[in-house]
């Protein structure tokens, strides 16, 4: 397999997330196992051997905290989606799916259909690597190329999405990369496609200025913070109730108790919302 680099910018952050998931998957006390994460990293970086790929990267305190948060959110969203489908949601939509492999690594109830949306270069890279790995989904899987800053709802419906059916939505780390009007438009479109009883879970990123101040010498974190656009401009926990959602916030103490791992200081927690 040759070097299959993704473009720079937001799309490259997916490789960083895959690197964290690959490292977690090697732990004996891992919170999840992602058998394809290392293949994505290898393909994106051109690592010539497993030993080279497995070599740990030095992290600043901020980088370690970000990695810990990625691990916690991965497990939290795994559990959220499995609970949602066990409760009857048979449509799952992963917006800005990146290098997410939940369609392959989770055990889904029979009849579950997972829709994944992302930009064409990400989809092309991901599908090529999964094909080379012989990955087989454990659900019905539909992959769409879409720019989520534009009209993606029509493409989702054309792919067979049913707005009248309950849906479990996941917006894992997307909103901070959008301008306020783009983030508002995305959540408004999502809301319009959500039948009563649909569920939504998401995370909100930290203030980029605070991240740079705390980790001024970490160029990787500086570059990441430079990609953030501000998202909604207000907490999603405030926006969603005004638009027909009932919100529950799952905070730091709850995550630590559930998963036996310390949550990074300043963790905002994760949201789960139900459409009324």
Image (cartoon, rainbow, N blue to C red):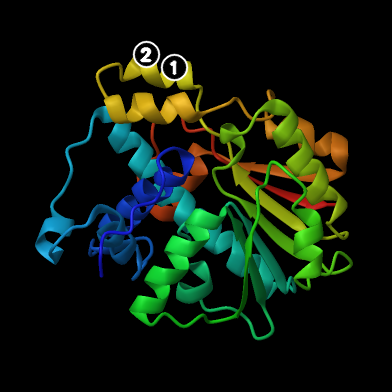
**Which residue was labeled with disc 1?**
210
Residue 64 tag number: none
Residue 84 placement, left or right of 239:
left
- Marks 1,2: beta carbons within 8 A: yes
Q: Residue furthest top?
A: 213
Q: Quadrant of residue 140?
A: bottom right
Q: Specify the quadrant of the image occupied by residue 196.
A: bottom right
Q: Which residue is mark 2?
A: 213
In the rendered image, residue 269, in percent from the top left (x then y), is placed at 54, 39
In the structure shown, which secondary structural element does the residue marked by tag 2 occupy?
Answer: helix
Q: Left or right: where does residue 160 sit relative to residue 67?
A: right
Residue drawn at x 28%, y 63% is 38
* Label 1 environment density (alpha carbons within 10 Å; few <14, some 14–19, many ≥20): few
Q: Nearer the viewer, residue 253 or 207?
A: 207
The count of marks equals: 2
The reply, left or right, for residue 140 in relation to residue 18 is right
Q: Residue furthest bottom?
A: 110
In space, the residues marked 1 and 2 are separated at their CA atoms by 5 Å
202, above or below 37, in the image: above
Report if residue 97 is visible in the image. no
In-front residue for pair 83/134: 134
Q: Looking at the picture, how far across and down is residue 215, in whole percent?
A: 31, 20
Q: Position of residue 84 (x, y in %)?
A: 67, 66
User: Which quadrant is the N terminus positioned in?
Assistant: bottom left
């Amino acid at each position: 397999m040759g070097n299959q680099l993704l473009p720079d910018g937001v799309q490259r952050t997916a490789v960083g997330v895959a690197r964290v998931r690959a490292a977690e998957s090697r732990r004996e006390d891992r919170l999840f196992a992602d058998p394809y994460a290392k293949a994505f990293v290898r393909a994106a970086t051109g690592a010539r051997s497993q030993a080279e790929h497995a070599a740990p990267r030095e992290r600043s305190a901020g980088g370690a905290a970000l990695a810990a948060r990625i691990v916690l959110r991965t497990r939290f969203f795994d559990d959220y989606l499995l609970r949602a489908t066990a409760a009857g949601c048979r449509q799952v939509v992963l917006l800005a799916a990146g290098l997410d492999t939940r369609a392959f690594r989770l055990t889904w109830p029979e009849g579950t259909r997972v829709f994944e949306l992302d930009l064409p270069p990400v989809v092309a890279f991901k599908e090529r690597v999964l094909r080379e790995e012989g990955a087989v989904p454990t659900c019905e899987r539909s992959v769409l190329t879409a720019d989520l800053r534009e009209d993606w709802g029509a493409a989702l419906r054309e792919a067979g999405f049913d707005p009248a059916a309950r849906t479990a939505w996941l917006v894992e780390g997307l909103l901070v990369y959008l301008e306020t009007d783009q983030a508002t438009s995305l959540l408004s479109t999502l809301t319009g496609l959500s039948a009563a009883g649909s569920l939504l879970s998401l995370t909100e990123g930290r203030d980029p200025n605070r991240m740079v101040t705390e980790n001024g010498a970490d160029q990787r974190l500086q570059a990441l913070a430079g990609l953030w656009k501000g998202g909604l401009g207000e907490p999603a926990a405030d926006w969603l109730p005004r638009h027909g959602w009932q919100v529950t916030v799952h905070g730091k103490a709850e995550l630590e108790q559930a998963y036996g791992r310390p949550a990074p200081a300043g963790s905002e927690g994760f949201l789960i919302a139900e459409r009324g």
